[in-house]
Amino acid sequence: MADSETKVVFICGSALRGQPDHGNLQAATFVGEAKTTASYRLHSIKDGWHPGIYAVDSGGISIPGELYELTAEQYDYLVSTEPPNMYPAEVSLEGGGRAIAMLYPQALIEENNWPDISHHGSWTAYKASQP
């Protein structure tokens, strides 16, 4: 899917198509829709500023999102625009694939008691439910 000069990135938050930070992907190539395996939790960070996901051993959900192929320059730019404390890591996708996603430290989520929004199923569903 990606050559040595590109990275496949899983997007599940504010950079999705139709979301306010989609432009941060620049002209990245849309590969398709995808879902993680059911091994992640989804939280709302800082009063809905952005989502935070992290891996769990049990009790996880499958998070829907989009896959993009980014050049090294596009990837570096995307990472530079991410909120503080987010970090790139591989996630497991349904069907056996893997991609890079921006995760958020579980310890910080717990320390700040940011709400678990996993029951909404996705970031866009959560945002749509807000007044």
Image (cartoon, rainbow, N blue to C red):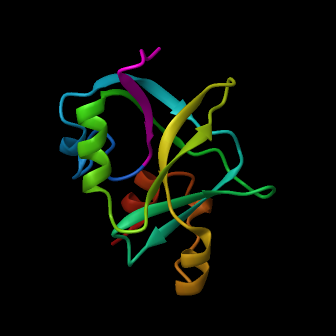
Residue at x 32% of width, y 53% of height: 14
Q: Quadrant of residue 95?
A: top right
Height in image: 117 above or below 73? below
Q: Quadrant of residue 130?
A: bottom left
Total marks placed: 0
The C terminus lies in quadrant: bottom left
Q: Check residue 14 for magenta coloring.
A: no
Residue 62 spot, x, y in % from top left: 64, 44
Kindly give the residue lying farthest to the right in the view shown.
Answer: 58
Residue 90 spot, x, y in % from top left: 57, 41
Kindly give the residue lying farthest to the bottom in the view shown.
Answer: 112
Residue 120 spot, x, y in % from top left: 55, 58
Residue 130 located left or right of residue 103: left
Residue 36 located left or right of residue 38: left
Closer to us: 17 or 10? 10
Residue at x 37% of width, y 29% of height: 68
Q: Check residue 11 for magenta coloring.
A: yes
Residue at x 45% of width, y 55% of height: 123
Height in image: 35 above or below 49? above
Residue at x 53% of width, y 67% of height: 43
Closer to us: 60 or 99? 99
Residue 105 located left or right of residue 67: right
Residue 77 spot, x, y in % from top left: 23, 44
Give the magenta-colored segment's residue range: 1-12
Height in image: 82 above or below 111? above
